[in-house]
Image (cartoon, rainbow, N blue to C red):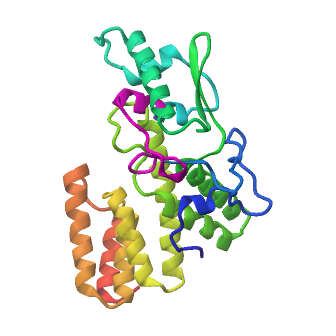
Amino acid sequence: MDSPRRHPMAVATARHPGSSMTAGGPAPVETDAGGEPAVLVTCLGRFQFRLPAGHPIEWRSTKSRALLQYLLNHRDRPIPRDTLIEALWPDPRALAPATSLKVAVHGLRHALASGGTDLPVTIVAHRSAYSLEASRIWLDVEEFEHCYQTGRASEARGFIAEALRYYARAAELYRGDFLEEIADEWPVFRREALKDQYLFAATALARAAITSGDYQEGVALCQQILTRDRCREEAYQMLMVCHGKLGQRGRIRCWYDLCVRTLKTELDCNPAPETSDTYLRALSGAL
């Protein structure tokens, strides 16, 4: 299983031989003469827009930055001005949002120009829309979705080891929730969908670790799952199995007690019968 950390630049164009993007997905990234993307963008966790040779971007406006984030993640088509206004200025009491959009576009163009004249990112104005043209660019979220989707396809074909390699890469890329610093509504649906994909991949990796007898790895993976979803009962169940196999009864009780408290506090419910049964079997050594 591929587990070492790798810089996104090293894997931006790496694709499994014979694999392809799913229908409707982004085209393969174009690279510079050295085979590397000119711009690296991270949206999972803290947003970063990294230019070649470390050229800085001068952000004079948070709305210009938000506009870039929106267009980057919808760059397959022109976005109507009304859609951008609704996403970035959702308050109906906002003054002159159309003018504010023009100001944000101007600010974004100025910010991009500050990164150099050869930057392969351009804001294009249409009759009543804007689009972003970006060729030599890599987005972590697109690599994440590719790995998740390819992993699911591999698993469906029965290629489990290959699927786990893709799941491991997807989990490695998931450094945080999608555009986690943005409080607007427009990223919320995709944020939750991507989190579900991460939880699926991480759970598959944890199950595989436990099946192979690597209980310490199973513990680490389950703990990572719970940092993203504190109410994920299957993660608590797998933790109790791991600690039971390791003969750590005190840890079994700690995780079960935490599960009970968390579910009561967050959801006002009790653990499922499967969770309580796993706890009793792990504590008695009957796993």
Q: Residue at x 70, y 57 (%)?
A: 35
Picture coordinates of residue 252 (x, y %)? 28, 79
Q: Residue at x 57, y 11 (%)?
A: 128
Residue 190 image position (x, y, % from top left): 48, 40
Q: Nearer the viewer, residue 55 or 126?
A: 55
Q: Which residue is depicted at the point 40% across and 10% down?
A: 99
Would you identify the image quadrant in which residue 86 lies? top left
Front residue (pair 30, 163): 30
Q: Taking 77 as reference, is 22 above or below it?
A: below
User: In the rendered image, is residue 66 in sight?
Assistant: yes
The part of the chain drawn in magenta is: 42-68
Relative depth, front residue between 168 and 51:
51
Q: Which quadrant holds residue 269?
A: bottom left
Instruction: Residue 61: say if magenta.
Output: yes
Residue 280 percent location from the top left of the image? 30, 79
> Quadrant where the C terminus lies?
bottom left
231 with respect to 25 (left or right) = left
Q: Is residue 257 above or below residue 178?
A: below
Q: x and y percent of residue 123 in the render?
A: 57, 26
Q: Is residue 224 magenta?
A: no
Q: Report the front residue among 225 and 35.
A: 35
Residue 138 lies left or right of residue 105; in this view the side is right
